[in-house]
Structures are given as C-alpha cells and as structure tokens.
Amino acid sequence: MKKIAIIIFSALMLLGIQSCSDFLDIRPENETVLDDYWQSESQATAVLASAYRSLTLNDNVRRMFVWGEVRSDNVVAGASSESDLTLILDGKITPTNSYANWGFLYASINYCNTFLHYAPGVTNRDQNFSPIKLHALEAEARALRGLCYFYLVRTFKNVPLVTVPSINDNQDYFVGQSPERQVLDTIIQDLKFAQIYAQADYTRGVYNKGRITKSAVNAILADVYLWDQQYDKCAETCDMVLADTSLVLVNGEKVISDVFYKGNSRESIFELQFDKDIQNSDAINSLIGRHLGGNILLGMVSYPPYLIRTGVYCPFNYKGTSVVESEKDIREFTSYAADSKSGSGFIIYKYSVSDVKKSLTATDTYIAQPRLTSDPVNWIVYRLSDVILMKAEALVQLNRDKTDLDVALRLVNRTYLRSNLNVDSLQSNNYSDQMNMEKLVLRERQRELLFEGKRWYDLLRMARRKNDPTTLAYYLSSKISGNSLSKNKLSVMDALYMPVLKSEVDINSKLIQNPFYTDESLSNQ
C-alpha cells in the first residue's frame, strides 16, 4: 500500500470547540501533529471532529454511493457519466479504475487511529478531561473506524488492517491485506466497545444525528452481523435500535422533504452533515443531480424505465401468484420521475428535490419542488427503516419456526404500509415459505432504500449466503443484456469484489491482487 498520508493537525491547536455547531464544522487539515499538541480536551476533540468531517469529503461520499449502488440493478449511465463510472455501470472494472482507490477511507481511519493513540495521554494533562469523557469519545472513534472498515471489507473483501496512526516517516507503510475474518472480528470488537461507552443522547438534535450514538453503533453492528451471517445477533442488535423511542418512521408523503431534504429527521440514525459554507454536498449533486424547478439537472446516473416499470425485475407493481405489491406505491412516484418526452429514463428524486407533492388536478401525478445548488443535503448512512428490514432479513434466514417468518412479515408491513396508502397488509398466506419471504424482503429493501448505497451490498449478501453469483447475475441480467463480457465478469464470487488499484500493487509487494483480476482470460477478454 502506498504510504498512508500523515493526516493530523497542529493547525487545529488554533481551533477551540466554542459552540455546539463547531464540532461538526471543522475542516480536516493536512498538517503534522507534534507530541506537544495533545494538551487539552478541546484539542483532542478537534481531532475527532476532523475524523467526522473527513468522511464528508467528496471522494468518500462518492465511494459510498458508487460502491454500494452503481454496480447494482438500480442505476445505469446518465447523460454525462465520467469514464471510470461508466465502466463500473457497464461491469467493465479493471485495476486501473479510480474507484478502486481505497486511500480516502484510510485517511479517515488514520484520524481515528491518531485520536485513539494520543487522546488517553491528555487525561494526565487536562484535569477536566475525565476517563468517562475519554471513553465516550473513544467510542465514537472506534465506531467511525469500524464503519470505514465495513465499507472496505464489503467492497474489497481482504484489506490492510491498520490500527496504529501514521505519525512519522520511520514507519513501515507497506502493509499487506488481512483476511476478511480478521477485519470483521476487529470491526465487531470496536463496535462492542462503542456499545458500552457511546452516548445515547447528546441533548442536541444535530449531534444526535451527526455524531455516533448508541443507536448508530447498534445499527452498524447489526449490519455487520447480517453480513457475517450471525443472524441471531443481528436480530438482537436491531431490537436495541428499535427500542429507541426517539426514532419514529416519518409519514410516507413527507419522507422526501423531511428525511432527504431537510435532514436530521426523527427517522434518521446517522447521517453525514453538510453545510454550504464548510462542505457542500457536491458528490451528491454530481452523482444524483438537482431539480431546479421545471428543469432537471442530470447527475452521473439515472434510472431507466425498463428496469423499474416492467417485467420480473420490477419491485413496484409486482405481480405475485395471488397478490400485486405496490400498485400505487408513493415511493414509485417520489423516488424518481419519468421523463417520457426525451426517453432518457428516470431521474432520481431522493436528495435531488426539496419536496414532491401530489397534483391537485391530475390523478396519481406528483410534482417535484426545486432544490437549488446552494441547498446542501446530508448523506444518510443509517435510518430506522433500514434497521427494520435488517431484522426482517435476519429472521427469514433464521427461520426457526413459523413465528420468525410472521414477525418478519410484520416488519416488512411497517415500511410497506406507510408508502402504500389505503391498502391491506401483505398477508402471510401469500408468503408461506422462506424462499418467498426472502424475495419479499429483498424487494422491499430495494423499494425503500433506492439510491441510498445499499442495493449492491444487499445482492452481494445474498450471493455470499449461497456462495454462488448466479442469482445476483439474474437480477442484473436486464442491465447487462447482450453484454457477454459483463456477464462473464459475474461468473465467480471474486468478480463481485473490487480489484486493488494497480498503482498500489505496483508500489507495495505485500499486496495481493484480487485473483479474478489477475486472470486475463476472465477479466480482460
């Protein structure tokens, strides 16, 4: 691996935490920290604040979307896709693709490692910085580090595991990958520490959504358990989140405005905070686009009608054996909009508009309200509906008795019914076995979490359970129809993970390329 940059900050010595908003408004600096920097609680806290802020940098947010969404059946190329993004959309991924660069998340990890290395010593220098305060901040740093590694391990599988800071030029920066099992165990260890010490409530709304809370820790940990096929622990950890009475599903018709435009809603668990004067949501603007009132400024990706409107691939208006799901699902009209005149497909509404309101004159017609460039939107990492459906998936996989499937169906109905108004609940007699329930949960997660960086990981989780990419390739078959090269690149499990960036492998002999990308007969034909 290339030398991980020493990203610490003596410049932050000039920055005190003066007010409640300062913590989430600090810009990451790129300076070297001297040992004598760590003298006070405010200095330590400033470094942790910069760890949060580093996650909002465009390169990190872009990867959260591209890694988790773009390879899935949810998106195809828009009007102005950059070349590396288009190659990923087409399934033509090579080790030279810039999105194979993991260095930006390792920079965020280094902030966390630096805080965890130096902060304990501050308790000896600042009498006001008690061990209790230290452990609460350590919980945040460990949870953020765990979240970063979770993105990396899901995307690359085996990755370098670095838990010490980059603090001087005498260190060995050439680190090889650790096995996925070791990385997952470290993530779980970090999150279990954070479970104990993380704050449940900062008493300030923006902190409760923009900083790590106990519910945020449990949401990440439940997701890790689900990925790791520890389904009983996933369900138990989801219950800890669902017991948080401060979290409530927003009315379905207000989701676009309250959850995705205004942000920090009662439904939100953890979201990256943006501010037009500090760090605007430029990555979201460029990838998803903005609705400017009467005109839609296209982002890099758009949703095509043939993937969402018709056939067996469609999660809306889905015709089962005895039931039709989501015939008038408001998510179909408020998550994206048909552009029938140009035939260019569907434009994403999530994040791109300020509101979507039902027309007073036209039946089943919704009108988007503009979101201007100057209106920043937060990037939601976890929200309540995601956790509800995590538990449903875990229970379906456990399938210990009929009760598990019944409870899973009730959980699906919680998100389904808020977006399907004046309809009956989905009934168990239409989903009487594990296979049908598994497909239902997958469809409902797609409907609910469209364009939130979740779908590829959902499909990959399914493939991992069977150790077979065949079903995943089926879901992508409409997107890659007629493209034999792309189909070939979904033929083995290793092909479902990203390659290691070629320049990293060239400079660091300890790194091992993903085997799929070393077989030219598979990856380059």
Image (tube, helix red, strand yellow):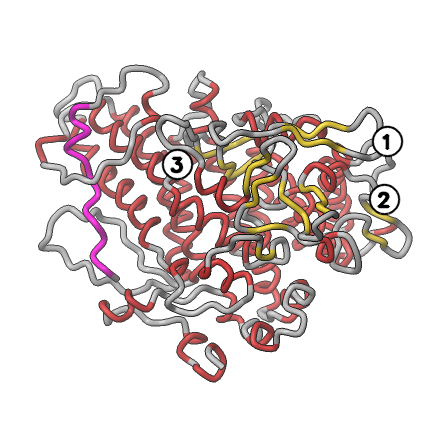
150 sits to left or right of 350: left
Q: What kind of secondary structure does the magenta stretch mostly adopt?
A: loop
Q: Residue at x 74, y 59 (%)?
A: 313
Mark 1 or mark 3: name the one nearer the start of the chain: 3
Left or right side of 453 for 278: left
Q: How crowded is mark 3: few (under 14 residues within 10 Å), some or many (20 or more)?
A: many
Residue 358 position, x and y percent, is 77, 28
Q: Residue 422 carries which label?
A: 1
Membership of 488 in magenta stretch: no
Quick one: label 3 or label 2, which is nearer the N terminus?
A: 3
Cβ atoms at labels 1 and 2 below 8 Å apart? no
- Quadrant holding the N terminus: bottom left
Vertical side of 33 occupied by 339: above or below: below
- Number of the label disc, if any, that sits on residue 427: 2
User: In the image as oriented, which residue stretches furthest toward the right?
Assistant: 322
Residue 249 visible somewhere in the drawing? no
**Numbered badge on residue 194:** 3
Count of numbered tags? 3
In magenta, the rendered stretch is 2-14
Spatial CA span between label 1 and label 2: 15 Å
